[in-house]
Amino acid sequence: MRAQIIGTGSCLPEKIVTNDYLSTIVDTSDEWISSRTGIRQRHISVEETTASLSTEAARRALEDAGVKAEELDLIIVATCTPDTLVPNTACLVQSELGAVNATAFDISAACSGFVFALNLVDAYMQSGMYQTALVIGAETLSRIVDWKDRSTCVIFADGAGAAVVRAAETGVSAGVMGSDGTRGGVIYVKNRENFNPFVPEQKPMDFLYMDGGAVFKFAVKKIPEAIHETLEKADLQVEDIDWFILHQANARINQMIAKKLNVSVDKVPGNVDHCGNTSAASVPILLDEVNRKGLLKSGQKIVLAGFGSGLTWGVLTLTWA
Ligand code: ACO
């Protein structure tokens, strides 16, 4: 049995922050941001939390799938911005949903998180361990971004996306995941506060640092390679794929990936213009948008791809239910 997505949902914070607004708090402009990233606005949490966004996205996915919370036997939340270190976000979601029969835990793999989590669910389903899972990607990156740093605060944003997954004859067909921990210095949030009395000097918590150029080069090289590798494993050609749902980091990155794969940009939908980069949430939010537009047809072949801090990357091919 393989992991088959049978419903999707997403949730974005109510507050929308435009490029023009950001240009009133840091030295930037709509022209700079939109021409380099494709981003025009993003959703930023005020009241919402990673858990509340996750829960609402999950409710919508369950409704779309026609599945009751009690039917879930597994909940995985991919996030690098949990509200609490313990309990994990998935347990908070479990409690809110009343998913009393689920095992619930989080994984952390930055922008590759949702793809890593779905790959994990697929492995569980191949083994027969779980039958009905909820996979969520959720972030409140606005909490770890330095709002005085124009190179990062214009890029990152908040939101959650979810997929209900059932063990079925078809679904995920192949995957390629990878990590290069030697390149951890490209995107990081280093210090947490440490109140241990044996630590001689308390360091304040850091904000997110990113070497944007390095991420750009890494993504446009690694993702086409990993997509080709995954397609080979699945015995598929690039032209067999109906949709490429790629991590929404930067519109230019995805245009370059499309060019390298020699596929029409029509097959590479994007929402970075209105969502910004929501890290682990970006793939499932986009998948839900495309699904709710009625664009995904039964039997279509889809590639999901994530890349980000770690460095990490993950690609899956799947057949739509
Ligand atoms: N507004 C105006 N100027 C800015 C801004 C801003 N918001 N940010 C940086 N600049 C300035 C820089 O200070 C620099 O000025 P200088 O030349 O005087 O030093 C100049 O613009 C050029 O900076 P670069 O970093 O070279 O700009 P570049 O054209 O490479 O674009 C960007 C930067 C958009 C970050 C690009 O490198 C990129 O998109 N990289 C990929 C990043 C990404 O996708 N990250 C997310 C993935 S990571 C993840 O998902 C976890």
Image: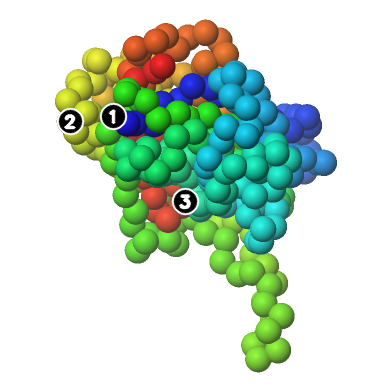
Look at the numbered disc 2 and give the secondary structure of its residue: helix
The mark that comes first in sequence, 3 or 1, is 3
Decide: marks 2, 3 in contact (CB < 8 A)?
A: no
Q: Position of residue 233 (x, y in %)?
A: 19, 33
Q: Is residue 253 visible?
A: no
Judge whether 231 appears above or below 136 on screen.
above
Judge whether 128 appears above or below 35 on screen.
below
CA distance separating discs 2 and 1: 11 Å
Decide: marks 3, 1 in contact (CB < 8 A)?
A: no
Reading the image, the residue beneath label 1 is: 173
The one of 198 and 274 positioned closer to us in this rendering: 198
The one of 90 and 1 positioned closer to us in this rendering: 1
Q: Position of residue 16 (x, y in %)?
A: 75, 29
Look at the numbered disc 1 and give the secondary structure of its residue: strand
Q: In the figure, residue 126 lies in which quadrant?
A: top left
Question: Label for residue 232?
Answer: 2
Looking at the image, residue 87 sits to the left or right of residue 280; the answer is right
Which residue is depicted at the point 47% across and 51% down? 109
The amino acid type of the residue labelled 1 equals Ser
Mark 1 burial class by Cα count in 10 Å: few <14, some 14-19, many 20+: many
**Comparing labels 2 and 1, the label whose residue is closer to the camera:** 1
Q: In the figure, residue 29 lies in which quadrant?
A: top right
The mark that comes first in sequence, 2 or 1, is 1
The one of 300 and 63 positioned closer to us in this rendering: 63
Reading the image, the residue beneath label 3 is: 109
Which residue is depicted at the point 60% across and 69% down? 191
The mark that comes first in sequence, 2 or 3, is 3
CA distance separating discs 2 and 3: 24 Å
The amino acid type of the residue labelled 2 equals Glu
